[in-house]
Amino acid sequence: MLKIAICDDDAGDRERIAEDLRVYAAAHQEHGIETTVYSSAFAMLDAFEKAGCPDIALLDICMPGMLGTELARDILRCSENTDILFLTTSSDYAVDAFALHAADYIQKPYTQEKLSASLDRVIALRQERTWLLLPCEGELHRVALEDVLYIETDGKRRSFSLASGRKLTARLTAAQLQDCLAGRRGMIPCGASYVVNLAHVRCFSGTDLIMDGGERIPVPRRLRAQIKQAYFDFYLEEVRNG
């Protein structure tokens, strides 16, 4: 089942988006799409606190009381697994939207084909993701490996820094961590304290790996040549695979 939520304060737009989503769901019954609709950001957040976050959220931006970008931040604090698609009449918030790693930014009025193509792409990417189950404070958290920037070790405590800015701490042995990451492309050890996701490395300064969020991960002198080569090889393969 794929849970998709809509939030728009305009009744006409809300009805149009819901109808377009019904059309899409009927054409893609293999996804088992379940839709919920909200007229305000506060109603959506209240529902999420009780029932959990959806897989995909279709959000208007210019809403009274809370902008859609602010709503997205609150959603992502609770669930890195939710993909955000903005549907809005304004182009003014595009930079803010993509800073939140939004899956898409669609301007109204849009076509059914435009929305369907966006959903096709987002759902395909979700199906390709590698998921990790992390035991954190008595709960199991499902995290997409692609969202992990780096992992920091302190004894048996592993702190997972995520693209949303959130950190999750799990108690894992070295063997358990190795099992989680076995065969995961782009995840490389960086000394005894860090495992880094090369997909989120902005550049290699020669002494540090600089991450997308600006964090600097120190590279031990003995590993610098090896990690520099791994970084080069990773992005060369990315280019080749297009």
Image (cartoon, rainbow, N blue to C red):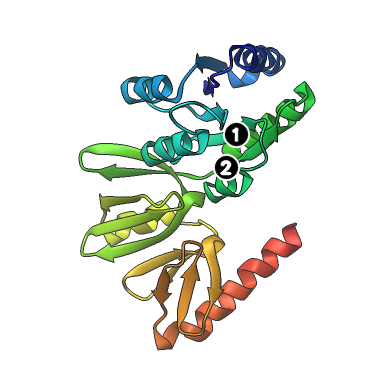
Which residue is at a point 31% across and 59% down the rendered structure image? Answer: 175
Which residue is at a point 31% across and 54% down the rendered structure image? Answer: 176
**Residue 56's spot in the image, x, y percent?**
54, 29
- Residue 69's disc is none
**Residue 16's spot in the image, x, y percent?**
67, 14
Q: Is residue 82 above or below residue 52?
A: below
Q: Is residue 68 shown left or right of residue 215?
A: right
Depth order, front residue of 143/17: 17
Q: In this view, does 100 lie above or below 62?
A: below
Quadrant location of the C terminus in the rendered image = bottom right
**Within-10-Å neighbours for mark 2: few <14, some 14–19, many 20+:** some
Residue type beneath disc 2:
Ala
Which residue is disc 2 drawn over? 102
Which residue is at a point 29% across and 61% down the rendered structure image? Answer: 174
Residue type beneath disc 1:
Leu
Where residue 48 sits, quadrant-wise, is top left
Depth order, front residue of 119/100: 100
Q: How far apart are marks 2 and 1 (CA)?
A: 6 Å
Which residue is disc 1 drawn over? 85
Where residue 185 sits, quadrant-wise, is bottom right
**Residue 1's spot in the image, x, y percent?**
52, 20
